[in-house]
Image (tube, rainbow, N blue to C red):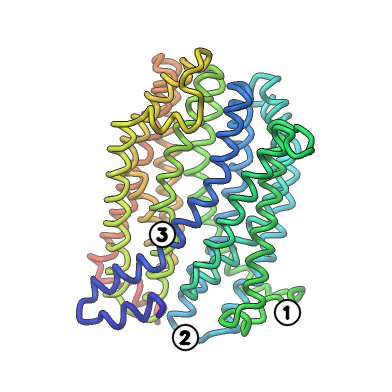
């Protein structure tokens, strides 16, 4: 039984049905996101065993890598609300769904080319940013091996949007689970020279992630081509045929989504680069704290993706009550979970940090002390981070992306980053100042997105009625 059917059968209690439907769709997405994050977390853990210098270089390289990656990811995510809305309007639609997926894959290829060119010059970019030459050289080597993960990762995201809109996200979870194991084994062998393979250091982590990403796309492509429910869409037949109207529609919806993600993620990337200007210890501690925060963020991120589908289905079906139920259900679950994670980060920081660094090594004492402090700030902004993530997904399901992009620009780059720089450098708070700026930026964006959602409700969903025609 699909999540939609679960909601229908529980129609005597629509809210209970929506909770069941949201969890049925959301938990595989959450676990899939955790699996994808686990690959990066594995790399960070192994880099920590190479020493603080390698960990700092890996953090620099990862942050530079994610800057352009996230922008392209926003373009790929436009496929999800488009597919969901079409299926909500016509449950057995094939042609329009296929058009969206194919053009999503076209877009993946086209956007990967400039990203590869940028990442190939990572060392020069980091030197230009004022990073230590030795760290920049090591980070540049890592990124040159990691950059080949971009295209298969984008392809995987497009196909995942397709199977998730059909409420079959379990396949993506299975493939990511295998990829996590594959990445861990390959990284262990390639970084340290086990099983007869060369010891490549941080470069081995980049190569391992690229190979694991290639496996993810190929694996999911095989599922889409062979599994009975997906096979009828003939997704890869005549793939070379252009569909410019659908391509332009994807760009129109995807560019604001890309802007939202770029503003959000690049402020964290900028924070890491600023930490590198303070000290290698601050950068290493920041890498640990942000990795822990990123793991907890996978739950509201999964709900972000699930609520986009649920709201999109209701939007296409012309169901204003369904839109409201889907949005608020995801919002309460996401914020509630992040409140629990905030409590965990504040009360047991040493336990969490011990997974990333040797707590007994004297040379790690400064990194550990800073990581404990940074993790306390990470705990404080957990609730706002969850609220803005789910809120963005709620509005995305309504194809409302342009105004949220403006909100992200204001909150992250207009308020959060300038405040963090002011507190860190002129006022002397260093890393603590940067984390305070991050927290304030998240609170501002979360409040603006919630206001946007509430305003649409007070207007009696007039915008939705106009959109439905």
Mark 3 and mark 2 lie on one chain; the one further toward the N terminus is: 2
Give the residue pinned by disc 2. 90
Q: Quadrant of the N terminus?
A: bottom left
- Of the image marks 1 and 2, the number of the one nearer the N terminus: 2
Which residue occupies the foreground of this view, 389 or 156?
Answer: 156
Q: Is residue 407 visible?
A: yes
* Residue 10 left/right relative to 227: left
Q: 371 or 469, which is in the foreground?
A: 371
Q: Does dot 1 land on a helix, a strand or a loop?
A: loop
Q: Is residue 362 above or below residue 291?
A: above
Q: Tell me: residue 133, above or below residue 384.
A: above
In this rendering, is residue 190 above or below 174? above
| Residue that lies at the very extreme toward the left in this rendered image | 12
- Can you give x and y, in whole percent of width and height, for residue 337 in the image? 30, 50
Q: Residues within 10 Å of mark 1 (few under 14, many from 20)?
A: few
Q: Position of residue 174 (x, y in %)?
A: 55, 62
The residue sitting at 50% across, 49% down in the picture is 261
Measured in 3D between alpha carbons, the distance from the residue under mark 3 to the one under mark 2, in whole angstroms, is 22 Å
Task: Determine which of the numbered discs, if any, sits on residue 383 in the image.
Answer: none
Q: Could one spot residue 140 in this view of the protein?
A: no
- Identified at 20% across, 77% down, the residue is 13
The reply, left or right, for residue 420 in relation to residue 9 is right
Q: Secondary structure at mark 3?
A: helix
Q: Residues within 10 Å of mark 3 (few under 14, many from 20)?
A: many
- Label 2 element class: loop
Name the residue carrying label 3: 393
Residue corresponding to mark 1: 237
């Amino acid at each position: 039984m699909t999540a939609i059917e679960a909601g229908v059968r529980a129609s005597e209690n629509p809210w209970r049905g929506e909770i069941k439907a949201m969890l049925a769709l959301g938990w595989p997405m959450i676990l899939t996101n955790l699996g994808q994050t686990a690959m990066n977390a594995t790399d960070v853990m192994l880099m920590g065993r190479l020493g603080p210098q390698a960990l700092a270089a890996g953090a620099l390289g990862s942050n530079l890598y994610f800057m352009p990656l996230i922008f392209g990811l926003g373009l790929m995510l436009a496929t999800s609300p488009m597919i969901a809305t079409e299926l909500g309007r016509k449950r057995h639609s094939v042609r329009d769904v296929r058009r969206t997926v194919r053009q999503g894959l076209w877009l993946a290829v086209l956007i990967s080319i400039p990203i590869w060119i940028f990442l190939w010059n990572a060392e020069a970019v980091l030197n230009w940013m004022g990073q230590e030459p030795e760290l920049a050289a090591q980070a540049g080597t890592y990124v040159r091996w990691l950059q080949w993960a971009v295209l298969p990762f984008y392809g995987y995201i497009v196909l995942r949007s397709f199977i998730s809109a059909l409420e079959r996200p379990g396949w993506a979870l299975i493939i990511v689970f295998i990829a996590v194991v594959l990445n861990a084994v390959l990284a262990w062998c390639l970084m340290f020279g086990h099983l007869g393979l060369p010891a490549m250091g941080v470069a081995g982590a980049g190569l391992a992630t690229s190979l694991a990403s290639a496996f993810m796309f190929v694996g999911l492509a095989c599922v889409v081509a062979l599994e009975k429910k997906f096979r009828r869409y003939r997704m890869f037949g005549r793939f070379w045929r252009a569909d410019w109207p659908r391509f332009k529609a994807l760009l129109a919806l995807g560019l604001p989504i890309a802007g939202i993600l770029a503003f959000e993620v690049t402020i964290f990337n900028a924070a890491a680069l600023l930490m590198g200007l303070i000290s290698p210890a601050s950068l290493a501690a920041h890498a640990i704290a942000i990795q822990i925060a990123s793991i907890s963020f996978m739950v509201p991120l999964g709900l972000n993706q699930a609520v986009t589908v649920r709201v999109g289905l209701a939007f296409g079906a012309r169901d204003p009550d369904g839109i409201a139920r889907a949005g608020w259900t995801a919002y309460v679950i996401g914020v509630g979970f992040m409140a629990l994670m905030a409590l965990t980060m504040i009360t047991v920081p040493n336990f969490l940090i011990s997974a990333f660094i040797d707590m007994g090594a004297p040379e790690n004492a400064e990194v550990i002390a800073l990581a404990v402090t940074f993790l306390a700030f990470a705990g404080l902004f957990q609730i706002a981070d969850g609220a803005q993530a789910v809120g963005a997904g709620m509005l995305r399901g309504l194809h409302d992306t342009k105004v949220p992009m403006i909100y992200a620009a204001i909150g992250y780059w207009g308020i959060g980053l300038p405040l963090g720089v002011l507190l860190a450098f002129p006022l002397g708070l260093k890393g603590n100042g940067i984390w305070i700026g991050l927290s304030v930026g998240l609170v501002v964006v979360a409040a603006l997105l919630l206001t946007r959602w509430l305003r649409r409700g007070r207007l009696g969903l007039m915008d939705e009625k106009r959109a439905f025609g």
